[in-house]
Amino acid sequence: MDFINIAKQRHSVRSYKNQKVEPEKLEQILEAAHVAPTAANLQPVHLIAVQSEEGLAKVSKAVGIYNAPLAIIVCADHNKAWVRPFDQKQSGDIDASILTDHMMLQATELGLGTVWVCYFKPDVLREEFNLPDSLEPVNILVIGYSDDDPADTNRFDTQRIPMSQLVSYENL
């Protein structure tokens, strides 16, 4: 399958089958994160893969995860992130997002559904998973076998702004 078709197939899944993600598929998803680029290759990220009932219950205290069998908490490590010298912008949240996108697209290629969750209580995750102050939970990638209908791969024609509004060449 080529990249653009994988990207078009991916959609936010909010209903999952009661089926575990196979260990070999989880490893491929984590490998996709491992090869993702980060600013200055500093890799200021940490992933917490949660699959046990106990762990998923902890995540559920911070956010609803739609009964998915797997959640990956994506954290930025502020002690390791590259800092742009001109305005002190830290790259950690950007790097965490790049890893999340890689994992999400890899999961799609493997026939899994995902939803990228940013609406959660970070203080609850910090407490439940004993996160040090340097680790910021940026998002949670929820993964499993979709119980939703497949998304229409032509939906972008009507659900996105036209390319002419998205892209400028040389000038605004």
Image (spheres, rainbow, N blue to C red):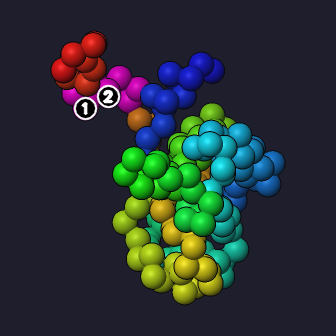
Please, which residue is most extreme toward the top here? 169
Give the SS element for disc 1. helix
Is residue 69 visible in the rendered structure shown here?
no
> Which residue was labeled with disc 1?
159
Residue 23: percent from left, percent from top: 79, 54
| In-image side of 123 versus 112 (left or right) | left
Q: Residue at x 70, y 74 (%)?
A: 52
Q: Residue furthest bottom?
A: 127
Return the x and y of residue 132 as percentages of the image width and height.
60, 80
Q: Is residue 145 visible?
A: yes
Give the Cα distance between marks 1 and 2.
6 Å
| Residue under label 2 | 155
Magenta stretch, residue numbers:
152-164
Q: Which residue appears at 49% of the width and 30% of the height?
A: 7
Mark 2 is surrounded, within 10 Å at the Cα level, by few (under 14), some (14 to 19) or many (20 or more) other residues, namely few
- Decide which of 44, 159 is in the foreground and name it: 44
The N terminus: image quadrant: top right
- In the rendered structure, which amino acid carries the disc numbered 1? Gln
For mark 2, give the secondary structure. loop
Q: Are marks 1 and 2 in contact (CB under 8 Å)?
A: yes
Given residues 154 and 101, the one toward you in this image is 101
Camera-nearest residue between 4 and 43: 43
- The residue under the point 32% across, 28% down is 155
Residue 155 colored magenta? Answer: yes
Q: Position of residue 61 (x, y in %)?
A: 48, 82
The kind of residue tagged 2 is Arg
In the rendered view, tell whether residue 47 sits above or below residue 56. above
Residue 105: image quadrant is: top right
